[in-house]
Amino acid sequence: MEETKENIEKRRVILDMDRCIGCSSCRIACARTHQADQNLTQAAATEVAIFPGHCRHCERPSCVEACPKEAIIHGEDGIVRRYSFRCIGCKSCAIACPFGAIDPSLLRNVIAKCDLCYFRLEEDLLPACVSTCVSGALTFEEPEEVIEGNLWGARIKAKPGLRRW
């Protein structure tokens, strides 16, 4: 069990921009999994591409430090979780996030944030966005391995299919 916990602590949702087709299946899966409280935002790279804006679950998350009500915590498993019953909707966490991964628009007066579908991880399932990504653009793996693989010219491992060039 500890081995699984260690793996979860190191793995993150990785986006391969060459594979993303902007279909929003990840956003729909997120909304469905979280019963309409969509935690996955959508980001745009100056009108060149639209892609999912995932929480990076930082080692030292600035959103946790910025929250005045401890509505966002950094768990021992490395997952940054949001507790909606504590959230007062002040948007401090959204302002503090350097990646823009927290949607500042309020949903029921609370901030929406990716939680890596920790309840699915506990059942040995992938986060909903990863398991429903039709193009294979989203994977769940260790960032260091992806970076190391890319340094050697390897592509991010994903589902088979065509790539945009």
Image (cartoon, rainbow, N blue to C red):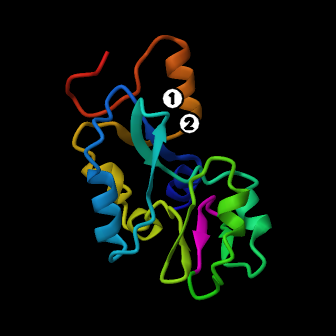
42 or 5, nearer to the observer:
42
State the residue position of label 2: 143
Residue at the farthest front position:
47
Residue interval drawn in magenta: 77-83
Q: What's under tag 1, amino acid-wise?
A: Val
Alpha-carbon neighbours of circle 1 within 10 Å: few (<14), some, or many (≥20)?
some
Q: CA distance from mark 1 to mark 2?
A: 5 Å
Q: Is residue 153 magenta?
A: no
Q: Is residue 99 left or right of residue 69?
A: left
Q: Tell me where residue 106 appears, x and y as whole percent.
A: 52, 74
Q: Helix, strand or loop at disc 2?
A: helix
Q: Using the rendered image of the protein, determine whether residue 117 is visible from the camera's viewpoint.
A: yes
Query: Of the numbered discs in the image, which one, if any, rests on residue 146?
Result: 1
Q: Tell me where residue 160 appears, x and y as whole percent.
A: 21, 28
Q: Is residue 79 magenta?
A: yes
Residue 95 vertical placement versus 21 (above, below): below
Q: What's under tag 2, amino acid-wise?
A: Pro
89 or 36, nearer to the observer:
89
Task: Tell me the residue at 68%/55% (across/down).
Answer: 97
Asked if disc 1 and disc 2 are in contact, CB closer than 8 Å, the reply is yes
Q: Using the rendered image of the protein, determine whether residue 16 is visible from the camera's viewpoint.
A: no
Residue at the farthest bottom position:
85
114 or 123, nearer to the observer:
114
Q: Quadrant of residue 38?
A: bottom left
Q: Tell me where residue 58 appears, x and y as whole percent.
A: 67, 51
